Image (cartoon, helix red, strand yellow):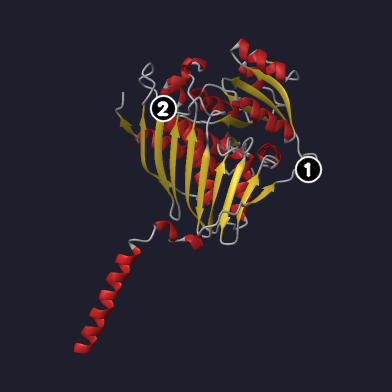
Amino acid sequence: MEFSRRNFLSKGVSSVAGIAATSMVPTLIFGQDLHTTLQPEEIIVKPQKRSKPKHAIRFSVIGLNHGHIYGMVNSLIAGGGTLVAVYAKEPELLQNFTKQYPQAKIARSEAEIIEDTTIQLVASASIPVDRAPLGVRVMKAGKDYMADKPGIVTLEQLRQVKKVQKETHRIYSITYSERLANPASVQAGKLIQEGAIGKVAQLIGLGPHRMRPESRPDWFFEPDRAGGILCDIGSHQCDQFLYYTDSKQAEVSFAQTGNFNIPDYPDYQDFGDMSVRSKHATGYIRIDWFTPEGLGTWGDGRTFILGTEGYIEMRKYVDIAGRQGGNHLFLVNQKETKYYNCKNVYMPYGEQLVSDVVNRTETAMTQDHCFLATELALTAQKMAFQLNVL
């Protein structure tokens, strides 16, 4: 026992001396063998050769209050849709729309479009609070519906929409464009499905936007009409969480909102964050209107997807490190580090939705997924702790 004790003390003294010695060595030395400055492999995704869409539909537009309608219409046309008519209450919005789409007949009323039996789908980017009631009328008329996000702004509207959708078996599709209309987001989905980062454990979604109050209509600053920041922009991130983690059920862990910098609109929310979780994944979402004027675009939207075998980062709209344009994706896993320029990635949403209208399928998005993403955002909006900042 005495020998063991002397041996232990001797080793202990040596260890202390070793620790003391290493304290005088620059910390930069540690981990040098684990660091490399090699540039990641750069991949420019090549455009796909695509044949003409197999299916065709006739669609019309009601409501032009958000510019997202142009991307929605373009995706439908590229996917095989024929634009027939448009109705909006605002003459100036109609003028801009018909200038870009001269083939669209200007309808005299909403009813003219809804009652036209040759129209299979109606697309809308009306004032957010009006989108769900319009969708209900469209579905009851036997047509499918494509809404800009937020496609629903209250839990009561969601209840009514789900009821009518179940009764009519029509499609109620919400265009979560940060995934469905972004090439990097589409590429991320492909990589995850191929197993590039293993099982997805967490998603972090950051949705910053630039605030220019003078360019926004009055309804934009009214949460009762626009839905609130988590309901609106947060629905994008909830959609991405469900999609990338392959979660069929989820719940909100916490949520909070605040007005930090818009004193002229005290009810407005320029910041919000929330956390969601499913049985096998978690997500954190942050939304804000603090993008500085020094940035060359409206927001540095980023998504971080953590897997058990690697991770993906998307810089969707700008790379402040200097790469041109948007649609940047970075992949790191057990084998490699890669950078993908995703500008040529084909976005299938429009073509898939046209196919779903014709075949009564759910290839663009399942109805359950569409509603659950919105339900998470609405639940977070309702339960959010109000930060008293101003």
Whether 138 is drawn above or below 88: the answer is below
Find residue 29 and report its horizontal and vertical position in percent: 44, 60
> Residue 14 vs residue 46: left or right?
left
Task: Kindly indicate the quadrant of the structure image that contains residue 180.
Answer: top right
**Can residue 1 be seen?**
no
Task: Please indicate whether residue 80 sits to the left or right of residue 323 in the image.
Answer: right
Residue drawn at (29%, 70%) of the image: 17
Spot occupied by residue 339 in the image (x, y as percentages of width and height): 62, 48
Q: Identify the residue position indicated by label 1 in the image.
A: 50
Residue 106 versus residue 324 in the image, above or below: above
Query: In this view of the protein, can residue 301 be seen by the observer?
Result: yes
Name the residue carrying label 2.
Answer: 270
Type of amino acid under label 2: Asp
The N terminus: image quadrant: bottom left
Return the disc, 1 or 2, that comes first in the chain's sequence. Answer: 1
Q: Residues within 10 Å of mark 1 (few under 14, many from 20)?
A: few
> Residue 206, relative to residue 311: is it above or below?
above
State which quarter of the image contains the C terminus. Answer: top left
